[in-house]
Amino acid sequence: MSKNKPQGKKITYNQLMAALADTARGLQQAYIRIANLEQYIGFYIEFKGREGKRFHRWLDKKKQEAQKEYDLHKNEETDGENLETSTVDEGPGSEGIRT
């Protein structure tokens, strides 16, 4: 009988922590880049002036449409659920006993 052994050595705690730190550092850098990009886009919209106002109206309209779609989707999920308590999972002899 063969035993199921892992193919390689297990990583140590320090190696795991180093890998997690690298991942966290990469995520932080990505967040900073996205924040800078958002700031630059905001500067561009302000620079455009009048067109920026039109763009903001368009964004507000899209936001409202997305919110309506989200609300509709959430309402559909709630409608499909059985919100009453069920006795299907109760064993024999435990009908009517609730805690």
Image: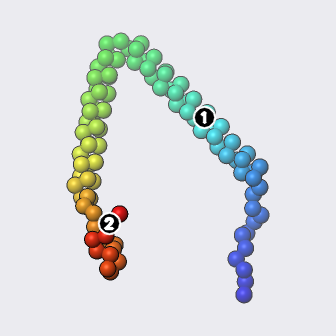
- Taking the spot 32% from the left edge, 80% from the top edge, the residue there is 92
Task: Tell me where residue 25 appears, x and y as whole percent.
Answer: 65, 37
- Taking the spot 28% from the left edge, 74% from the top edge, the residue there is 95
Q: Nearer the viewer, mark 2 or mark 1?
A: 2
Q: Is residue 80 above or below residue 40?
A: below
Task: Tell me where residue 39 appears, x and y as whole percent.
Answer: 49, 22
**Label placed on residue 28:** 1
Q: Which residue is mark 2?
A: 98
The front one of 89 and 11 is 89
Q: Amino acid at mark 2?
A: Arg
> Residue 41 is drawn in which quadrant?
top left
Quadrant holding the N terminus: bottom right
Question: Residue extending furthest bottom?
Answer: 1
The front one of 59 and 18 is 18
**Label placed on residue 58:** none
Badge 1 density bin: few <14, some 14–19, many ≥20, Cα 10 Å: few
